[in-house]
Every structure is written in structure tokens, then in C-alpha cells.
Image (spheres, helix red, strand yellow):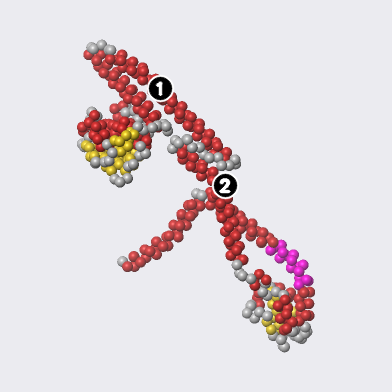
Amino acid sequence: MTGVSSQRPLASSSLAPERRHRRWRHRWRHSLRLRLITVFVLLALAMAAVFIGGMQRAFSTGWRDAARPLVADYVDRLVAELGTPPSVARAQALVARLPISIRIEGPDVNWDSHPDRQRARAFGPRDGDWFSRTTADGHRIRFGLGTLPWQRGPHGVGWIALALLLAFIVVAYAYVRRLLRPLDDIRAGAERFGEGRFDAPIPLRRRDELGDLAQRINTMARDIQAMLDAKRAMLLAMSHELRSPLTRARLNAELLPDSPEGAIERAALLRDLGEMRDLIADLLESERLASPHMALQRETVDLAALIRDVAAEHPGGARAVLELEAVPAMSLDRARMRLLVRNLLDNALRHGADATQAPRISLRADDERIELEVRDFGPGVDAAHIEHLTEPFYRTDSARQRVTGGVGLGMYLCRLVAQAHSGTLTVRNAEPGLSVLVTLARV
């Protein structure tokens, strides 16, 4: 056991660099800035390597042939200046005056100006005939490079070059970040437009291609907002206009003869007219809640008492099991919250009508939020339909029958009411049944 436990830290420590590498690779692949900076740095290094290599190649071919007679003549003059036999004092004077090294080997004089350095640093074996001479008395004199001027000073040139390279990279990153800043604005603007908030357009910071793209997206957003406003206006106008003929039709239905056949027809007609009236009311309410200028009529509401009242008023509310904790009063829109609770209760009663357990309404709270859960114990909903249940006019039955799921506005209205109160609505399969959880932040 001790051997296994001692190997675990080693395994985790070996995986850490791999995870960091994988995270960095993922970030590099998904970051245009990092890829541009990498391209710039690699391009700069490649250009420097090509330039230096090309210059060295150019000088190495023509420079040797041109410099050979000059260097040979200069070396001959230095040998003549040393004399025969070579004078150590003159050699010391030359080393002190020129950045060269001198080594004398012979029967009378053996001297080295830089005894601690290797002779291989002269200029290479194949250049030995340039810098080596043999005098008439048998002394061999070899010349090489001594201490160069920049070697006498502090050795900080490399660090300075590295610091300058890093500074150039930082400046390039800052410039690229500034160039790509409109992309951040476009991304944030696209997120706002996707959420239906068209009041804040994308700021136009430049007049290049990215600025033109931001301008076109702003134009598209204005067109979409105009189409949505036109759709809402049309729905509101149609709903208002339909109310008057519905009222007249309902009045005419009330005036039908009181015969048995007429009573049955009148009841059916009044039921259909009532459903149309409720549909129009739901359409109007959904458009009001979806409007960005919608204002809630907030007041202090005891949510537990409101749930009891809705359950008492509903025809089948007596079947529901209430598990309501004592929660503090909240600032809510009473009418909208009644609509939410009524729709959720009606949905639970309809889909859990054949279940062995009655629907349950739970209310609980903690320090940060209040949760309202309405659950039935019916057959539930197929997982493919869960994420679409809060969409307008969505119904799980393909035949779209009223007895199986209404017109598909109830859950949509519940989601709008929750969002209007800065809350969330979550739908899940509770196995058995369906659970709808409304979460409201405690203010």
C-alpha cells in the first residue's frame, strides 16, 4: 500500500506539465492574437537568420580571397618587427597595442601571450598558413585573436538583446490587441443581440474592415429589431381587434333559444369562445412580458399565501399537496405571479390526472434565493422535448389537440414571468413526472 501511495504524487506531477501544455495548445488554437504574435516572432527570427546567414555566406566567399594578400603582408611586417631572434618585449608591446595573441616556439625563445587559452581559437586549422611564420633561426611564430574590445567590458550584451526582443514582442502584442479590439466589441454585441437587447449598438472604433463589419452588424440588428417590433405590433393589433367580435359573438350565443338542442350548442359555442378569449389574453400578456419596455407592478407579496389562494380558486386545486415553508415577503408583481402559479398548477393537474400521487407544490428558501417547485407524478415528457417546453406554441403532441397540451403558451408565459423578476425557470424529468423549478433571488 505504501508503494502505491508514494507513486500517486509522482504520477500527478508528471501529468501537470502535460495538462498545462494541452491547455496552452487549446488557448493558442482559439486565440487569433496569440497566433498572430507567434507568426510575427517566427517571421522576425526567420528574417534575421536568413539575413545573417546570407551575409556570412557572401563575406566568406569573396572576403577570404581579397583579404588573404593583405593579411599575409601584415603578418610579415609583424614578424619583421619582432626581429631575429624574436623579442619578447616587442611581442608584449604588440599584444598591448593590438587585439592579437602571439605564441613563439623555438630553440631560444618560448613565449605565449595568452597561455590559458587554447590554440584552436586562432582562426581554424585551414587558416594556419595565414598567421604562422617560421623565421630563419628556426623560431615559429603564431598569431591569433586576443582580447577583443567588447570582451573587456561587462558581459551584458546578450541580456540587453534578450530584453529588447521581449520588449518588441510586448509592443507587438499590444499593437495586435489594439487592432483586434473591435472583435471583442463585435462578440459582446452579438451576445447582446442574441439576448434581444438591441438598445446598445456595437461601438465603431475604426474605419477599416472590422469597423465596416461592426457597422453592418449594427444595421442587421436594427433591421431585426424593426421586424420584431412590427411582429409585436401586429399581434397586439390583431388581439385587440379580435376582442370586439368575440364579445359580440358571446353575446349572440347567450341569446340562442333555450331548447335542449340550443342549450348544448350554446354551451359548446361559449366554451370555444372562452378558449379564444383566453388565447388572446395570453398572446397580449406574452407580448407585454417580452417587450423590453415592460414594467412590473411590484408590491410586497406573501408568496405562500398567494399559492394557497391560487390552489383554492382552481377547480382541481384541492388535489394538490402544498409543502410551503414560511418565506419572507418579497417585492413581486402579484398578477404575474398568480398567472405563473396558476399555469404551473394547471399543467401539473392535467398531466398528472391519471397518476397515483397528487401534484405537489413546494416552496423553500435559503439565504440567497427562493425556490418554487411544481411537480406532477404523471408519465413525464420525452427528453427530446424538455428544452423546447418553454418555447411559444410548442406542444409535445404532433396532432396539437387541446385536451393534451393547450396551445403552448402556458410554460412560455411562466418563463417570461420568472425572467421579468430576474429569476430562472428550469424543467426536468423527475421520474416519475415532470418538475418545474422557479428560482427567485432574495432582494
Segment tinted magenta in the rendering: 56-71
x, y percent for residue 20: 45, 57
Q: Identify residue for label 2.
A: 179
Residue 287 in the magenta stretch? The answer is: no
Seen in the picture, residue 142 relative to 435 is either above or below; the reply is below
Residue 51 placement, left or right of 270: right
* Residue drawn at point x = 45 percent, y = 36 percent: 197
Q: Residues within 10 Å of mark 2 (few under 14, many from 20)?
A: some
* In front of the other: 71 or 151: 151
- Residue found at the very far front of the displayed protein: 300
x, y percent for residue 405: 31, 30
* Residue drawn at point x = 63 percent, y = 78 percent: 117
Seen in the picture, residue 256 relative to 72 is either above or below; the reply is above
Q: Identify residue for label 1.
A: 238
The answer to whether residue 49 shows anywhere in this view is yes
The answer to whether residue 432 shows anywhere in this view is no
Q: Callout 1: helix, strand or loop? A: helix
Which amino acid, mark 2? Leu
